Structures are given as C-alpha cells and as structure tokens.
Amino acid sequence: MRLVQAAPKPRPGEATALTIETARGPLRLTVRQLQAMPTVRYATLHPQLGRRFVYEGVPLRDLAARGGFAGQDVRVSATNGFAATIRASDYLQFPVMLAYRADGHAISTLEKGPLTVVLPPEPARFHSTGYSAAWVWYAERLAPAP
C-alpha cells in the first residue's frame, strides 16, 4: 500500500485547480497543493499539439487514492464539459499523470493547461486513436467512473 502525504492548506485567495469527488464530499486542491504531492516526470508527444514536452505532475493513482477510489476506473472532467474515463488497469500499471508543468513551466491554456491528463510514451497503444480522448485538457474534476 502506498501512503499519500497530506497536502498543505490553501492560502487565502488561492483558486481551486482540481476537485476530487470523495465519499465525504468534494476535496478541492490548488496547484500549489498538487505540486506538494509526489510527482512523476517524463517526455512524451502531445498528440493534439504535435509537440514533445517534458511533463511533470501527480500520478493519477495517487489522486484516486486521495479520493478513496484507487483501483476503480476514474472519470476526468474538463471545464468545457468534456469527460473521459481512464481505466484503473492503465493508471495503476503505468505513470498516467495529471500534469501541471510542461518543459519546466506552468502549462498555458494554448498548450492545454493549466491541468491536463498525460499518458506516458509506452505502451504505444496510449498514442493510438483509441486513447486520444484520454488526453483531457483543462481538467478540473476527478471522480470514480459511474
């Protein structure tokens, strides 16, 4: 079992970046709180942008654990109403992340930020059309899949 450390308390006026739906109600996290969690970093090609970035973010498995639904499929929703389901078998076995940084900088809205789901370069199936919907950008909410 992997322990997830507590995030620091939000500062007055800090905006919520991500809401995790938990059994006890919504857990609202700021970007600073996400950055305080264990991170992963890897280079991969963003399929919609056609550019390679070194992404940094929080593994989806840690966010699901924080929400109390690790091992369940996860529903990631975006600010524009788009939502995608990411299989537990994928995020538990591979370092699928919710990225907040690309090439050492905050991810701009033009680069699909400030939070975006990023799939690792391997296995190759993550970069097929069958997985294109999993690259959720403008992500704002995480919940167990219905």
Image: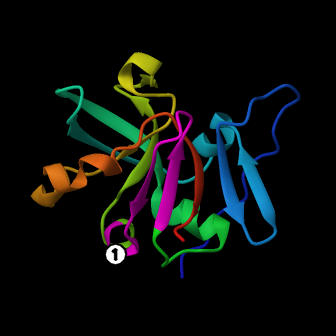
> On the rendered structure, is 7 left or right of 91?
right
Vertical comparison of 82 with 62: above or below: above
Residue 112 placement (x, y as % from top left): 40, 27
Q: In this view, does 100 lie to the left or right of 20?
A: left
67, 1: nearer the viewer: 67
Local packing at callout 1 (Cα closer than 10 Å; few below 14, some 14-19, many 20+) is few
The reply to whether residue 140 is in sight is yes
- Estimate the x, y position of residue 18 in percent, counting from the top left: 64, 44
Q: Residue furthest front?
A: 81
Q: Is the N terminus in the top left, top right, bottom left or bottom right quadrant?
A: bottom right
Q: Name the residue under label 1.
A: 89
Q: Which contiguous range is marked in magenta?
A: 74-90
Indicate the position of residue 8 as horizontal and vertical percent values: 77, 46
Q: In this view, does 113 lie to the left or right of 50?
A: right
**Residue lying at 72% horizontally and 36% vertically, measured from the top left:** 16
| Helix, strand or loop at mark 1 | helix
Residue type at numbered disc 1: Ser
How are the colours assigned in the image?
rainbow
Task: Residue 109 in the image: state x and y as whole percent.
Answer: 46, 20
Question: Is 55 rendered above or below residue 94?
Answer: above
